[in-house]
Amino acid sequence: MRSRVEWLERYQVALYLIALLVGAGVGLLVPGVAHPAEGAINPVLGPLLYATFLGVPFAKIGQAFRDWRFLITRLVVNFVLVPVVVFLLSRIVAHDQVLLVGVLFVLLTPCVDYVIVFTGVAGGARDRLLAAAPLLMLVQMLLLPVYLWLFVGNEFVRAVDLAPFVEAFLLLIALPLIAAGLTQFLAVRTRAGKVLQEIVLGAMVPLMMLTLAVVVVSQIGGVWQQLASLLRAIPVFFLFAAAMIPIGAAAGRIARLDVAGRRAIVFSGATRNSLVVLPLVLALPAIFDLAPLVVVTQTLVELVAMVLFVRLIPRLLPAHASERADS
């Protein structure tokens, strides 16, 4: 089993792209599966986030606060600099409120799951991203309504029903987080808990593949039908990913982080929480029916960008000779 898990982790980026292609093919060739697949998003996303949070070392989470330079840099990049970039880029679609809402939802929420995967592939500090993941998740949920109020207006915020938001947070964030903490507690004290932890962590790549495929199957038909409208949002997503490379690198350098930390900051700033945000956007009023497709479009653009990032970032931020020797 260990060799199989190692193989999955080694080729996970390619496997994610295959899952996207398979999902797109099924969704376009068999459009009738879109509705059942949409209903399956939350059931597959919950286990994925459970596996993601299970990788967070809760017993060592205090280390995330001790590494205060990395933590503060990550918070500043994601909740001070990113909103400025998003506001400026969102002017491209500001004339269309539905596109604007979709863009804001997905770009204002930093990723807590597969950012760890891509950071690790690129030689970044994935352990520090893991340790700070719960705090990042909490902060974005608290600040997202504030940013939406600032960028869209009070009328939009008041028109949104908060009940689905609370339900999504409890089922997709709080419950997997608590379950992961309990599993780690049992893993230290019982063999059964340890076996469960190993099985779930070993299933991380298949769970990510399944989630990506289900999301794409459920939404690709709508993306294709609304492609003319969605094309206006695509430049925003590519420009955002490109802008976060120099911004993240500069922030890491100013904070005097090591190279692994700088790479992690770049990935944290560039990757967004599309899989977690999608259920929230699906809960919006019917007038915003295009917004979920905007989120899915960002996912597709981002995964293409991440394939480039894992090659590009190590070259832009090369390890020093001493760091290579240590590794």
Image: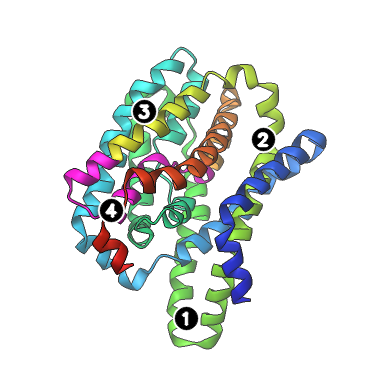
| For residue 249, side relative to residue 195 (left or right) | left
Please identify, in this view, whether the residue under mark 3 or under mark 4 is nearer the observer: 4
Farthest residue, direction top = 95
Query: Mark 2 vs mark 4: which is more N-terminal?
Result: 2
Amino acid type, mark 1: Leu
Residue 42 seen from this side: no
Identify residue for label 1: 186
Q: Residue at x 28, y 47 (%)?
A: 74
Report x, y in % for residue 237.
47, 29
Amino acid type, mark 4: Val
Please say if the residues under marks 3 and 2 sit with CB atoms less than 8 Å apart: no
Query: Mark 3 vs mark 2: which is more N-terminal?
Result: 3
Report x, y in % for residue 90.
40, 22
Magenta-drawn stretch, dominant element (helix, strand or loop): helix
Q: Residue at x 22, y 49 (%)?
A: 72
Identify residue for label 4: 259
Amino acid type, mark 2: Gln
Identify residue for label 2: 219
Please say if the residues under marks 3 and 4 sit with CB atoms less than 8 Å apart: no
Cα distance, mark 3 to mark 2?
24 Å
Query: Mark 1 vs mark 4: which is more N-terminal?
Result: 1
Query: Mark 3 vs mark 4: which is more N-terminal?
Result: 3
Callout 4: few (<14), some (14-19), or many (20+) C-alpha neighbours within 10 Å? Answer: many
Please provide the residue range marked out in magenta: 249-276
Amino acid type, mark 3: Val
Residue 276 seen from this side: yes
Identify residue for label 3: 86
